[in-house]
Image (cartoon, grey):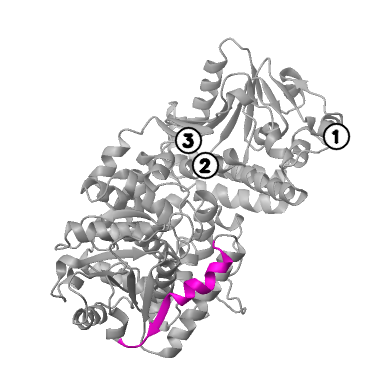
Amino acid sequence: MPRGMYRVSWLSRVSVLGAGVMGHGIAQLAAMAGYEVRLLDIEPSILERALEKIRWSLMKLAEKNRYPEEAVEETLARIRTTTDIPEAVEGCGLVIEAVPEDIGLKRGLLREVEDYLQPEAIIASNTSTLPISELADATQRPDKVVGIHFFNPPQLMPLVEVIKGEKTSEETLEKAVEFAKSLGKEVVVCRQDIPGFIVNRILLPLLDEAAWTVKRGEAQPPEIDSALRYKLGLPLGPFELMDYTGIDVVYQAMREIKKRDPRLLMLCPLIEEMYRRGWWGRKSGRGFYSYTTEARRPPKISREVGEKVDPLWILAPAVNSAARLLRTGIIEREELEKAVRLGLGFPEGILSLAEKLGMDVVVKTLEAKAALYGDFYTPDEQLVEMSGRKREAVYEGTLTLKREPPIAWITLNRPKKLNALTQEMINELELLLGILETDKEIRVVALRGAGGKAFSAGADIEFLKNLSPEEAEKASRRWNNTFKLLEAFPKPVVAVIEGYCFGSGLELALACDLRVAREDSILGNPEIDLGLIPGAGGTQRLTKLVGLGKAKEMIMLGENIGAEEALRIGLVNKVYPREGFEEKVKQLLEKLAEKPPLALKAAKQAVNLAAEGRFEEGIRFEAKSFGKLMSTLDAREGIDAFLSKRKPRFRGE
């Protein structure tokens, strides 16, 4: 059996009631760990299909060297199927109910099963949402009823939630934990029988908010899925996940939770509508996406389609729910973070992710939603308290983010490597831009390198040398797409160049709106000496700035230039002396921050259209924007201030 699996001393035979998606997976796990298994369902044909799926799964594991091939038949031999309840539970020390999420069905089955159980047998439910206490009350042994919630697919997902009902004994709870660990699983314990337990109290508000965002016309499913996958690193977007899980399953879970805790979610009518129409996702051929191929694969979702969606707009209610779990003492933070990582496949815990996004930004997002849509979104007091400890350094990783409203500083944070760029840094840059886009206190973003020796010396050679041609092309497109986000960012972005600015570092600076350099800075494109060319849009952006001849000279010769030469050819906008550099930069940023935000955004868009050679489109956009800006409070303030001979105070309205 695989590492981590072992049999506990008090148990030899396990009964699994229900041979559906979850039931046959649980039966497989128990058999793999060496237990005898009885698998029950109402039709022999269902049981036959379950055994076929178990065999297929075991063979797949064997192909991937995750299970010994010679053990497959032996494991299958430990599983006996039956349609007879007395036979299913005979001699079993643990019975696991895994039938559909219908509390009447589950309670009736447990009542019927109990008559045939030995006195010391434990009854467990694999429910993901229904209260264990309500199930336990259907039996004469509520102290021996416990929740053991596996995740789909049970054979692969590493987490199990163990839930204590109101009357579950400590002995039963300990045995349930011991059993789950004997299957090689990581375990989190929910010591209070709350609707949704731990993981679904995070997941379901996320799914519900995604649906509400579509219902309100703020974004479409592919845009949201793209943003959460590519900007946050989630394995599936919310609509992909609902289609995969089954919209019927999601709706029923949400309905049961909302009955018991209306504070957790509002249950978007869009999900109910999909359920009523029978559009349940992959299983029905239609859900939020259409599944027309035999493999029933959804359309591919590009990174670009989600560029305009702020993932925090979707994530914030789930963060709020996580904060509420901490405040009520239901689970410790470490266990909560583990549950989210292992149960949902998040790249990190939800609170760690929220801290990187900025707890204060999360709170502001919820407050904005509350103002628009009601008190449901009011930030939990625990979240507000957490946000107070995170107001200065909002984020710290391979990039750092420091808010000094109205200015935000993004710093490339690898000074020992001269801030050489890696994929991780590019990912983090996307994340931080998403945070700052909706931060109304921030009007200007400054991008700089840590240490004072380099803005960035280019792409990390260790990263480059391991790329295949296909991977290199993919990385080139990915980095350029991120730099496009920087170009299209609705607020001014200034590259603050101190020291070396080479290769991809220069390409990053080129994507900013303005470049200011310290007098001793050196800039260049040395890629040609590596047998390469600029790979993140540098050939195009450099040509727009300095002209065809100078761009060819810099790229084809690979020679570096000083700051003054860069200023002369238009590569940088300002050059400041080393002494007083910080003060000069700050004065420039403050001057930019005083300008009207709406006009700055429109000006940036219009000029970018010109740079792309889209003259006629640019003229139309300019005229339309000019008209729109005339209706703004900022335009009124600017005109009034001019006539009154005073300094205007723009508010972005």
Is residue 356 left or right of 415 when viewed as pictured? left
Q: Position of residue 451 (x, y in %)?
A: 57, 20
Q: Which residues are magenta?
A: 67-84
Name the residue beneath numbered marker 2.
Answer: 433
Would you call the spot at circle 2 few (<14 residues within 10 Å), some (14-19), or many (20 or more)? many
User: What SS does tag 1 mark?
Assistant: helix
User: Does 22 appear above or below 515?
Assistant: below
Image coords of residue 449 (percent x, y):
58, 26
Q: Which mark is residue 552?
A: 1
Mark 3 vs 2, N-terminal side: 2
Left or right of 598: which side holds 95? left
Q: Mark 3 packing: few (<14 Cα in 10 Å), some, or many (20+)?
A: many
Let me know if residue 76 is in the magenta part: yes
Kind of residue at disc 2: Leu
As drawn, the residue found furthest toward the top would be 579
Q: Residue at x 18, y 56 (%)?
A: 170
